[in-house]
Image (cartoon, helix red, strand yellow):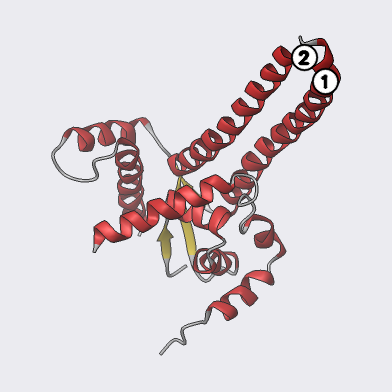
Amino acid sequence: MVKELTEEEMREEILKDPELRKIWGALKDIVPEAVVEYKKRRAHERSTDN
Amino acid sequence: MSVLLITETNWLQNLVLVQDSASAYLMRLARTEIIEIAVPEYSFHEADGSLNRKHNKRAYKVDEALSLLGQISQTEHYREMCESGRYVLKDLKKLMISDRSEIKKVLGKIESMVRVIPYTSDASTRAEMIFESASPPFKESDCRIYASILMFAEQVQEEL
């Protein structure tokens, strides 16, 4: 049985990779309104899927 | 390689905008060669287009503000203050241009780290047929992504 990683464990793994650190969340401050719009759209899609 | 994961635009946006751990962790697994990730070329264009639209809206508003200050500065006693404002806004515009390059750079970097599913003319024709049919997906861009994934999956299956 494969152990499911916690959020924290996943973050630790991600931070081990310097190249990945450069792209992870890299554009969230550049276009913050895109983050808001994307989150709203995903929430809407999830509610219509259920 | 035992697992091939096909992702699309939402995964890209999760990765660069939302700092979603699961999306980034999948990329980590791909980087350590546990899985392989393939992303449709069209998804990169879609993500770039959507981020740019937001960015352009901002740039357009800065242009409008520059033009407004130009008009107001025609009143002599406002001129000095308007010129200072225009100076700051011009600097802001320069920064925004470099942010535009950052969007391209980040998406380009991801493109170099995954397997890219090409958007071919055959995929385009297939996408048109899916779009004209009465079955999902109903959005034109989704049809393009879906068609290129279908063709890629068929090709991968043939290779096995």
Q: Which subunit holds the residue at mark 1?
A: B
Residue corresponding to mark 1: B83
Q: Which corner quadrant holds the C terminus of chain B?
A: bottom left
Of residue A34 and residue B132, the one placed in the foreground of this image is: A34
The residue located at (32%, 42%) in the rendering is: B142
Q: Give the residue at the far bottom of this rendering.
A: A1
The residue located at (42%, 61%) in the rendering is: B5
Q: Which subunit holds the residue at mark 2?
A: B
A44 relative position to B43: left or right? left
User: Helix, strand, or loop for circle 1?
Assistant: helix
Q: Give the residue at the far right of this rendering.
A: B80
Tag 2: Cα neighbours inside 10 Å, few (<14), some, or many (≥20)? Answer: some
x and y percentages locating residue B73 in the rendered image: 77, 14
x and y percentages locating residue B62 in the rendered image: 66, 28
Please state which amino acid type lies under the numbered disc 2: Ser
The residue located at (57%, 76%) in the rendering is: A10
Q: Are marks 1 and 2 on the same chain?
A: yes
Q: Of marks 1 and 2, which one's residue comes earlier in the chain?
A: 2
x and y percentages locating residue B20 in the rendered image: 53, 64
Of residue B123 and residue A11, the one placed in the foreground of this image is: A11
Examine the image and state in which quarter residue B83 appears: top right
Disc 1 to disc 2: CB gap under 8 Å: yes
x and y percentages locating residue B75 in the rendered image: 77, 11
The residue located at (46%, 56%) in the rendering is: B11
Q: CA distance from mark 1 to mark 2?
A: 7 Å
Please state which amino acid type lies under the numbered disc 1: Glu
Residue corresponding to mark 2: B73
Of residue B154 and residue A32, the one placed in the foreground of this image is: A32
User: Helix, strand, or loop for circle 2?
Assistant: loop
